[in-house]
């Protein structure tokens, strides 16, 4: 098991009870270098977001980062106002309305903005995703699957992209659908789906972990995809290329223990190559909604109750989103350090690449005490140069 580098004790994670507490959670999460993993770890060490915000500049300074400041209270107040204007509700991990299935994934979002009815997030759900440049046959299949699953009591979950996603949402407005966005819940992306987004917010639910008003960028979509699969009991892929976001979602679903399903396609159709690869590798073949229900069981057996308040902060490692939640924030300057510490930071970066490496393996490779490696990891993390992953893994950003 990967050893804990920063603290050997945790305090109970208490969901926020007041607007002030919620603002503090949001301010901590929007601070530079603080993604889900760091959020949960620091909350476990200090007990509350307010307490973490008090010590965060000192932690950064001890790690060699000077002129570090948390997200400003003014920016958070503006985001809260934007949320109220959009009719959105802020859900925090541990709230009774926080999606139960999402709380069980390795890297749950500490906060979610929700437009619409959050009760849809606790209903039995199936995620359906696929190609943006879908064929007419693919869109027909997606609509038929979604309609029949909706009639059977399932909520559909997708990402509001053009093609398969839009077909799924449009087909289940009357029975329940959830759109997971890579940007803010008040930003329609693509813009052609603005009317559909409004209808989903009125009849279903729209969710995002990103700040209000954020226009999505490419790096936000893989993070969005883990929420798409995390909200559902299973994932169906309808038309997907061999290298596509849908296959990333399928991989995340498998890692989360969700049922991965795919609709087969003609071998000569590039839009079906990803689905055929999934089927080759063991995904459940789907011909109709009956196949989905056979794989998952009836919707009545899949409904979830409210999520229990966690007794302590999550201690496992969680993926980071370094700096995504603080667009435009300046990179803090590092104070001059003795050459050995600079050498340690260089040695860490030299051993890390895009493929995640276990932290304990990194420590063994460096042949240094964990107490020396820990502050360097924190500095690199706050500096946005490394990224943490589930299972105690770390990589370059």
Image (spheres, helix red, strand yellow):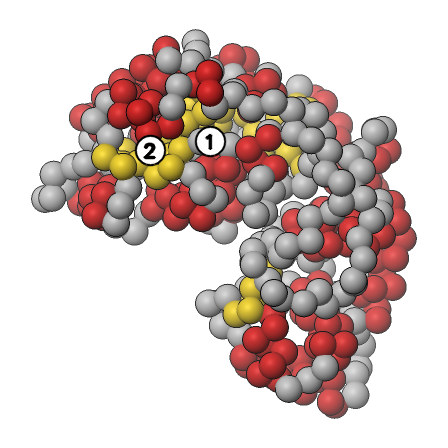
Picture mark count: 2
Q: Is residue 381 left or right of residue 56?
A: left
State the image quarter where residue 152 is shown: top left
Vertical comparison of 218 with 230: above or below: below
At x 70%, y 25%, the residue is: 96
Kindly report the distance in space between the C-alpha atoms of the residues bearing marks 2 and 1.
Answer: 10 Å
- Percent coordinates x, y for residue 335 in the rendering: 80, 77
Vertical comparison of 36 with 211: above or below: below
Q: Is residue 20 left or right of residue 386?
A: right
What SS does tag 2 mark? strand
What SS does tag 1 mark? loop
Q: Which residue is mark 1?
A: 232
The answer to whether residue 196 shows anywhere in this view is no
Other-residue count near label 1 (Cα within 10 Å), few / some / many at <14 / 14–19 / ≥20: many
The residue positioned farthest toward the bottom in the image shown = 339
Instruction: Looking at the picture, tell me which residue is in the foreground, 135 or 121.
Output: 121
Q: Which residue is mark 2?
A: 236
Q: Is residue 116 left or right of residue 195?
A: right
- Percent coordinates x, y for residue 3 in the rendering: 67, 67
Vertical comparison of 242 with 348: above or below: above
Image quadrant where one finds the N terminus: bottom right
- Percent coordinates x, y for residue 15 in the rendering: 78, 35
Q: Is residue 396 left or right of residue 67?
A: left
At x 47%, y 23%, the residue is: 302
State the image quarter where residue 187 is shown: top right
Vertical comparison of 156 with 183: above or below: above
At x 79%, y 74%, the residue is: 64
State the image quarter where residue 85 is shown: top right
């Amino acid at each position: 098991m990967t050893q804990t580098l920063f603290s050997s004790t945790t305090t109970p994670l208490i969901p926020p009870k007041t607007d002030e507490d919620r603002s503090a959670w949001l301010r901590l999460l929007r601070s530079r270098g603080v993604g889900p993993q760091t959020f949960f770890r620091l909350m476990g060490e200090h007990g509350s977001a307010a307490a973490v915000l008090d010590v965060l500049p000192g932690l950064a300074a001890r790690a060699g980062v000077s002129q570090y400041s948390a997200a400003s209270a003014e920016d958070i107040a503006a985001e809260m106002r934007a949320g109220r204007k959009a009719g959105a509700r802020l859900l925090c991990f541990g709230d009774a309305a926080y999606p139960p299935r999402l709380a069980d994934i390795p890297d749950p979002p500490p906060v979610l903005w929700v437009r619409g009815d959050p009760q849809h997030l606790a209903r039995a759900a199936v995620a359906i995703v696929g190609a943006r440049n879908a064929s007419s046959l693919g869109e027909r299949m997606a609509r038929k699957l979604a309609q029949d699953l909706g009639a059977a009591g399932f909520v559909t979950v997708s990402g509001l992209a053009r093609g398969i996603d839009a077909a799924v949402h449009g087909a289940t407005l009357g029975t329940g659908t959830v759109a997971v966005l890579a940007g803010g819940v008040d930003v329609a992306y693509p813009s052609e789906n603005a009317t559909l987004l409004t209808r989903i917010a009125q009849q279903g639910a729209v969710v995002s972990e990103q700040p209000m008003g954020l226009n999505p960028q490419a790096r936000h979509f893989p993070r969005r995809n883990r929420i798409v699969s995390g909200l559902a009991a299973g994932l169906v892929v309808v038309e997907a290329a061999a290298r596509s976001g849908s296959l990333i979602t399928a991989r995340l679903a498998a890692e989360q223990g969700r049922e991965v399903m795919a609709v087969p396609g003609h071998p000569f159709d590039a839009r079906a190559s990803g689905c055929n690869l999934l089927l080759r590798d063991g995904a459940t073949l789907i011909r109709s909604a009956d196949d989905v229900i056979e794989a998952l069981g009836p919707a009545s057996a899949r409904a979830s109750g409210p999520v229990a308040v966690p007794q302590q902060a999550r201690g496992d490692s969680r993926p980071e989103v370094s700096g995504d939640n603080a667009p435009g924030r300046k990179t803090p300057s590092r104070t001059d350090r003795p050459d050995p510490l600079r050498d340690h930071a260089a040695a860490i970066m030299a051993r890390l690449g895009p493929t995640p490496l276990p932290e304990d393996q990194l420590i063994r490779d460096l042949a240094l005490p964990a107490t020396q490696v820990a502050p360097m990891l924190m500095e690199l993390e706050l500096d946005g140069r490394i990224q943490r992953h589930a299972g105690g893994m770390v990589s370059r950003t």
